[in-house]
Amino acid sequence: MKRVTRKTRIDEPHVQAGCPRSHAVHVRQRHDATAAWIAQTTPACPANSSEEITSEAASRLLHVSRTHLNALADAGVLGPVRRTEGGHRRLVKAEVMRHLKEAQDRQLKGVQDMMSASDELGLYEDEAKALRPKRFRRP
């Protein structure tokens, strides 16, 4: 009977075939988990919403610093920006959410391109072949 490590499940295809898990399989699983997380954590916002938010709230939505967000706003990337009498920026929430969706799509495409390039070049095949499953040692 074949022994497996605690982290390996018997019903996984690579265990049944008697070979170690390749890096590409691991990356694909991480990619799928990341894509699912992005879909769950992206808040919904109607496209025609004119609700305004502060630069602080927008920076929290985009997970960037306020300095970077202000640079994006000044460059016009986040749509129209209104300034209050005190000089504070107000951004349209729908535009901020549009930018978030575009950024997530770019990230996802980049990961997919990187994975396909790695598969085409066979970059991790030698490393995967060198891996040996760890076995339990009885005391």
Image (spheres, rainbow, N blue to C red):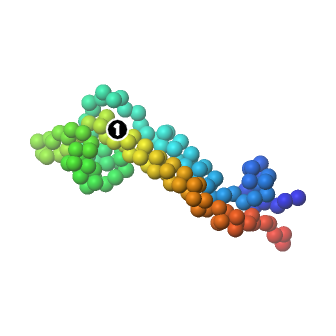
Query: How far across and how far down the image is residue 79, in percent?
Result: 24, 39
Note whether residue 9 is visible: no
- With 57 as the anchor, is 6 left or right in this view? right
Of residues 55 and 31, the one drawn nearer to the viewer in this rendering: 31
Q: Tally the numbered discs.
A: 1
Residue sitting at x 75%, y 59%: 19
Placement of 22 over or under 72, stated as above or below: below
Note whether residue 72 is visible: yes
Of residues 90 and 34, the one drawn nearer to the viewer in this rendering: 34
Of residues 73 and 40, the one drawn nearer to the viewer in this rendering: 73
- With 109 as the anchor, is 92 left or right in this view? left
Query: How far across and how far down the image is residue 50, in percent?
Result: 26, 30
Placement of 45 over or under 64, stated as above or below: above
Query: How far across and how far down the image is residue 108, in percent?
Result: 47, 47
Residue sitting at x 80%, y 66%: 136
- With 40 as the anchor, is 64 left or right in this view? left
The amino acid beneath tag 1 is Arg
Q: Residues within 10 Å of mark 1 (few under 14, many from 20)?
A: some
- Image quarter in which the N terminus is found: bottom right
- Image quarter in which the C terminus is found: bottom right
Kindly identify which residue carries mark 1.
98
Placement of 122 over or under 100, stated as above or below: below
Query: How far across and how far down the image is residue 69, in percent?
Result: 27, 50
Q: Please, which residue is most extreme toward the top here?
A: 48
Q: Please, which residue is most extreme toward the front here?
A: 120
Residue sitting at x 64%, y 53%: 25
Of residues 70 and 84, the one drawn nearer to the viewer in this rendering: 70
Residue sitting at x 66%, y 58%: 22
Dot 1: element: helix
Q: Please, which residue is most extreme toward the left here?
A: 85
- With 118 as the anchor, is 56 left or right in this view? left
Q: Please, which residue is most extreme toward the bottom here?
A: 139
